[in-house]
Amino acid sequence: MRTLFPNAWFVARREFRMRVRSRSFLIVTAILALVGVGLTLLPLGIELLAGSDDRRVAVVASGNDIPGSLGGTLQAALNATETDPERQWQVESSDDEPGARQEVTDGELDALLAVSRGSGGDLAYDVFTDEGPTSSLHVALRSALYQVSVSDRLQRAGVEADANQILAPPAITVTRSDPDAQDPEENFGARYLFAMALVILTFMAVITYGTWVASSVAEEKSSRVMELLITAATPRQLLAGKVLGTGAAGLTQYVAVVLAAGIGLVLQNVLKGRLLGAESANQLEGLQLGVLAPFGLFFIGGFMLYAILYAGLGSMASRQEEVQQVTGPMIFVAMIGYFAAFIGLNTPDAQWMQWLSWVPFFSPYLLIARAILDTVAPWEWLLAGALMLAFLAGALWVAARIYSAGVLLYGQRLSLRNVFSAVRVDR
Amino acid sequence: MSLVIERVSKRFGHVLALDETSFTVEPGRIFGLLGANGAGKTTCMRIVLDILRADTGSVTWQGRSNTQLPRDTWGYLPEERGLYTRMTVLDVLRFFASLYGVPEADATREIDDWLERFRVPDYRERKVEELSKGNQQKIQFIAAILHDPDVLIMDEPFTGLDPVNVQLLKEAFLEMKARGKTLIFSTHQMETVEELCESIAILDRGRVVVEGAVRDVKRAMGRQVVRLATDGDGRVDGWLGELPGMTVGAERQDYVEIRVPAGSDPEAILRLALQRGERVTRFEIADPSLEEVFIEHVGRPAAAEEERHLAERTGGAA
């Protein structure tokens, strides 16, 4: 049993330098970083292009018996129930119905309201809009027009009162029995998105950089440099070096892209303030950013676990084309964790989710998702961490055995049986 | 104190690659490992290097099992050449030296020295992929010796080299021998073996069919060869029949090779020739060539192997 270092370090250093200096690495990293910034700025761009959030509604009255105050009442009712603080409703009167229709078609008006009196004297509304029946415009209009009609009926029934006063929103205060209780629904949307983002980022890193490791091993095999390598260093040193070197290069790219996206996110908040002039909500607010530290550790642990096994399996391929074939099982395992995380996101407190989240192949996804959406006890962190370390050592042992047998197998049928029959080297 | 391979067997599935293979290499010698393709030479080398494990048998060097020996005992030139082609010559050589724990300054000095010796000092900063196959092979040789190994194991080191580079490599072999190193190499080129090797082993289907000092191996054949040249037309087939058992082995441009069976007196040829009034310009009694030894034991010439081997290589066997 020879020590891992310094040879693993030499292998890692060579691997890292060759990768990071390669033209394709620089180009791909630059493109991904741009995409990262672009994606985070996308919502702002859409907002800018869409212009103001304000809604404009035109009212055309047919007949003289429509009260002139109707437009004002409607506007007050719409603004009173609007939940988006940045959105203002504007209701204006119009005599030019065809012109207003054209404006709706051109998208300058959100809706045109033709008001008339029905046979019973009740107000009837004809709404002309390009928005679908489920849009928020319909919901808002329906509830506001209901109030307008109620106030009109009250007036016709002889109740003399200020419509605004009648329709003013009531004062409601809510006191909860347990003032410390955290609302599970509070910020759930934002936290859900946060957890999902981390799960996707982990999955992509595992698959992408795992494949890097595997094809890099296969490349050494097909270029026949492998035979020299295993004469000079042990399979464990080579494997560990490969995983560390490729991993470091992968993380470099990864951090560059995530940093770019983070800058984009901060930039978006600043730009939004400048461009739209509105006090914008911080999108990172309400997220447990403290979870990023354990996430980092489990991310690296899981990443190495997958990469080590990828390297072992990659040694079974004689050519680049066979890499996909031999690493198939790893993608399958990663997919299980990925989909389990997505199902589990909706039921973060389920028992199976808890158990599965301790398993090292899945903990980078599931434990983190649970920590964001639910709670993870300290002993669970320790248990999952210990299991991760044990699996890492075990994976290195297994992969080194596959590797020492696999690297000398050329052109043979790829099967685990073949490899295990060749696995006799013990060092 | 020698390298002892003792009753080593290795089976791959249904194929018995090595069958109780035994031979001994004396330290400080150049040793030739000969055999047809698939005879087990590469497997044997890999087992000595401990990158493959034998099913049974043992390998010891200076009394220590090869599984206990440090890695820098061995220098290896694999049959399938391979280097990191996108790295510069200097970087790739320094990398391999670092794996063996050679300090960078020492490695750099040795690299420059060997590049000079191989007359390619300007390749230092070139990428490996820009070099010709023959020059890559020289770099590969340097990679095998930078850590100053005691035993140098080379699989077909001369294959694919032009005559100038073959000569440079031979000189490098002799330099390593002068430094007290032990060299083991396999080849199909019998002239090279005759020129360099003190001892050989011939493998056939995983078994050692003959082993020992080159001279002893030849003598053990029992026969001799007479090289005869005369002033006349040089033909001997008219009268050679009078001597029982003597046959013409090969008719060269300026002499005839005559096989002399064991127990016959080669000088009988000279006497008969003079008796017949031939003017003898050359008469030489020699041991049979290694080529003949090889054919005797393996049943076919080694050169045929070489051709088949090259055909396989260029046919994209990699």
Image (cartoon, rainbow, N blue to C red):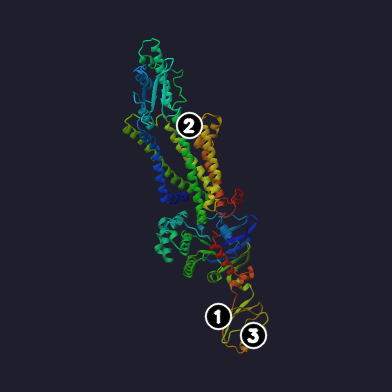
| Residue A371: mark in rendering | 2
Q: In the rendered view, does B36 fall on the left or right side of A122?
A: right
Check disc 1 and give the amino acid type.
Gln
Q: Nearer the viewer, residue A12 or A314?
A: A314
Measured in 3D between alpha carbons, the distance from the residue under mark 1 to the one under mark 2, in whole angstroms, is 90 Å
| Residue B238: mark in rendering | 3
The x, y position of residue A233, in whole percent, is 50, 53
The x, y position of residue B164, in whole percent, is 46, 70
**Residue A233 visible in the picture:** no
Q: In the rendered view, does B189 fall on the left or right side of B240?
A: left
The x, y position of residue A424, in whole percent, is 60, 51
CB atoms of marks 1 and 3 within 8 Å: no
Q: Secondary structure at mark 2?
A: helix
Check disc 3 and give the amino acid type.
Gly
Bin the neighbour count of mark 2 within 10 Å (Cα to Cα): few under 14, some 14-19, many 20 and up. some
Q: Secondary structure at mark 3?
A: loop
Bin the neighbour count of mark 3 within 10 Å (Cα to Cα): few under 14, some 14-19, many 20 and up. few
Query: Which residue lies at the image location 50% right of the left edge and 46% below the top edge?
Result: A211
Q: Is residue A158 above or below residue A96?
A: above
Residue position for label 1: B253
Q: Earlier in the sequence, mark 1 or mark 3?
A: 3
Q: Are marks 3 and 2 on the same chain?
A: no
The x, y position of residue B17, in whole percent, is 62, 59
Q: In the rendered view, does B20 fall on the left or right side of A294?
A: right
Q: For mark 3, name the chain.
A: B
Measured in 3D between alpha carbons, the distance from the residue under mark 1 to the one under mark 3, in whole angstroms, is 18 Å
Q: For mark 2, name the chain.
A: A
